[in-house]
Image (cartoon, rainbow, N blue to C red):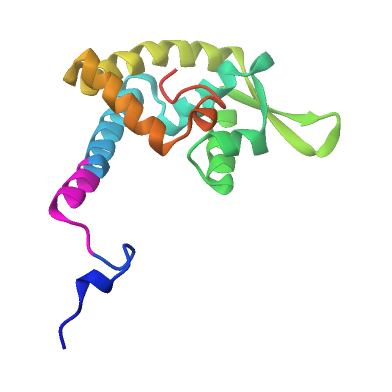
């Protein structure tokens, strides 16, 4: 019995060649670039890309502090993953935990002076790597196109809710 592809919903149809190439290209590029950025930060500053991202958000927050729940919503980690990461950052002296006076159950993650210093050092490396592995591969016109493509995927209101992943 032949399957009538015209009656299949878009969720049931396989991706076409061009659709699949675009999707796989996006996933592969993200994975390769993320690994390169992570490796560089780890080698040069002893920070994972996820640790850098947490420090980035804290550095951009008023008084270098964010509620743990707010931080979890900002970074690309699960709440339990963020808790483990913040535990490591606390152990390394880069972040402190502070209680929330208004809500005894709430906790803040607070950037320490050592954390701010490490972030500033790592930021220079990270931005240079982003330029090398991503930005330098495109013309200004292409970057404008890419930016507009991603704005379709992540509405501007959501994208502007916190610091960018590169800082």
| Residue located at (55% from left, 25% from top) | 162
Spot the residue most to the bottom: 1
- x and y, in percent, of residue 113 in the image: 60, 12
Q: Taken as a whole, is the magenta stretch helix, strand or loop? A: helix
| Residue located at (51% from left, 35% from top) | 75
Side of 46 where 90 appears, left or right: right
| Residue located at (16% from left, 88% from top) | 1
Question: Front-most of 91 and 158?
Answer: 158
Highlighted magenta segment, given as a residue range: 14-25
Residue 29's image quarter? top left
Q: Total marks drawn?
A: 0
Side of 152 where 163 appears, left or right: right
- x and y, in percent, of residue 97 in the image: 69, 29
Residue 104's image quarter? top right
- x and y, in percent, of residue 70 in the image: 64, 34
| Residue located at (28% from left, 35% from top) | 35
Spot the residue most to the front: 6
> Quadrant location of the C terminus?
top left
52 vs 117: above or below:
below
Residue 15 counted in the magenta span: yes
Side of 44 where 89 appears, left or right: right
- x and y, in percent, of residue 23 in the image: 24, 47
Residue 126's image quarter? top left
Residue 134 counted in the magenta span: no
Question: Front-most of 46 and 154?
Answer: 154
């Amino acid at each position: 019995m032949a399957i009538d592809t015209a009656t299949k919903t878009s969720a049931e149809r396989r991706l076409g060649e061009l659709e699949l190439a675009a999707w796989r290209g996006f996933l592969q590029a993200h994975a390769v670039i993320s690994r390169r950025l992570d490796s560089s930060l780890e080698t040069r500053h002893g920070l994972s890309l996820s640790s850098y991202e947490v420090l980035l958000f804290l550095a951009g927050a008023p008084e270098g502090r964010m509620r743990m729940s707010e931080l979890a919503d900002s970074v690309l980690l699960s709440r339990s993953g963020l808790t483990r990461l913040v535990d490591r950052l606390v152990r390394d002296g880069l972040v402190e935990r502070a209680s929330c006076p208004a809500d005894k159950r709430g906790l803040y993650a607070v950037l320490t002076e050592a954390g701010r210093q490490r972030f500033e050092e790592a930021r220079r490396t990270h931005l240079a790597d982003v330029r090398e592995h991503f930005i330098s591969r495109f013309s200004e016109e292409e970057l404008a196109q890419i930016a507009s493509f991603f704005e379709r995927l992540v509405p501007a209101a959501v994208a502007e809710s916190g610091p960018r992943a590169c800082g």
